[in-house]
Image (cartoon, rainbow, N blue to C red):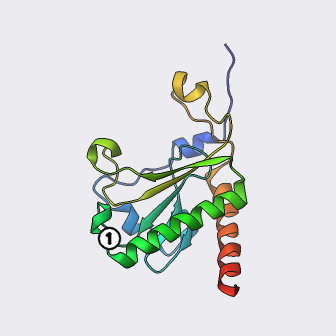
């Protein structure tokens, strides 16, 4: 049997999880430290956050600041802003990581969310040709080739650059 050594992953595996019953999607933006919160970009009504438990490197979450649990609960301005934030997230990932495609969407309701946080959030998952392999199926393990902090630095810098370019256009 061959062994896969990813020693840097232990820090990620042992990282503290957000306490049960807390509301991380409203509490993390209030920290005042976007790097610690893994927030890549903010708008007036929503923000982009690097998923702490990603399916693929660069997996972003688009989250409205106001805590709601379903799409109809958003007002018109929040809906527009959240969709624009998701489009911006796709542009950030396309520019920074150059994926071959994306999975973009929402998990709505307890049955599909696996009991995760009830605060509405959209997923923007970059995909590459051949990115699925035997590890998740047989080893029940995902292999991420880059530390979250390094991915955050790259995506935050790209988001700032794209936001500046958009503001001057």
Circle 1 Cα neighbour tier, 10 Å, few/some/many (<14 / 14–19 / ≥20)? some
User: In this view of the protein, can residue 30 be seen by the observer?
Assistant: no
Q: Quadrant of residue 90?
A: bottom right
Name the quarter where the C terminus is drawn.
Answer: bottom right
Q: Secondary structure at mark 1?
A: loop
Q: Position of residue 87 (x, y in %)?
A: 56, 65
Q: In this image, 67 relative to 162: left or right? A: left
Q: In this image, 85 relative to 131: left or right? A: left
Residue at the location (39% across, 74% down)?
Answer: 78
Residue at the location (32% across, 51% down)?
Answer: 108
- Look at mark 1 in the image and give the residue it sits on: 74
User: In this view of the protein, can residue 151 be seen by the observer?
Assistant: yes
Residue at the location (58% across, 49% down)?
Answer: 102
Q: Position of residue 1 (x, y in %)?
A: 66, 13
Residue nearest the viewer, comparing 151 with 98: 98
* Residue 90 vertical placement versus 127 (above, below): below
Q: Position of residue 33 (x, y in %)?
A: 53, 72
* Residue 144 vertical placement versus 151 (above, below): above
């Amino acid at each position: 049997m061959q062994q896969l050594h990813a020693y840097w992953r232990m820090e990620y595996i042992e990282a503290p999880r957000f306490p049960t019953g807390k509301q991380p999607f409203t509490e993390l933006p209030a920290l005042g430290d976007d790097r610690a919160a893994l927030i890549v970009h903010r708008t007036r009504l929503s923000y982009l956050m690097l998923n702490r438990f990603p399916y693929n490197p660069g997996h972003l979450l688009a989250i409205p600041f106001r805590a709601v649990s379903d799409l109809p609960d958003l007002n018109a301005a929040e809906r527009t802003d959240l969709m624009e934030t998701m489009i911006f997230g796709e542009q950030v990932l396309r520019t920074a990581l150059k994926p071959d495609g994306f999975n973009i969407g929402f998990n709505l309701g307890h049955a599909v969310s696996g009991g995760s946080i009830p605060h509405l959030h959209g997923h923007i998952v970059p995909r590459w040709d051949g990115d699925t392999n035997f590890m998740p199926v047989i080893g029940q393990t995902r292999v991420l080739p880059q530390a979250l902090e390094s991915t955050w630095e790259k995506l935050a810098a790209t988001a700032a650059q794209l936001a500046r370019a958009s503001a001057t256009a």
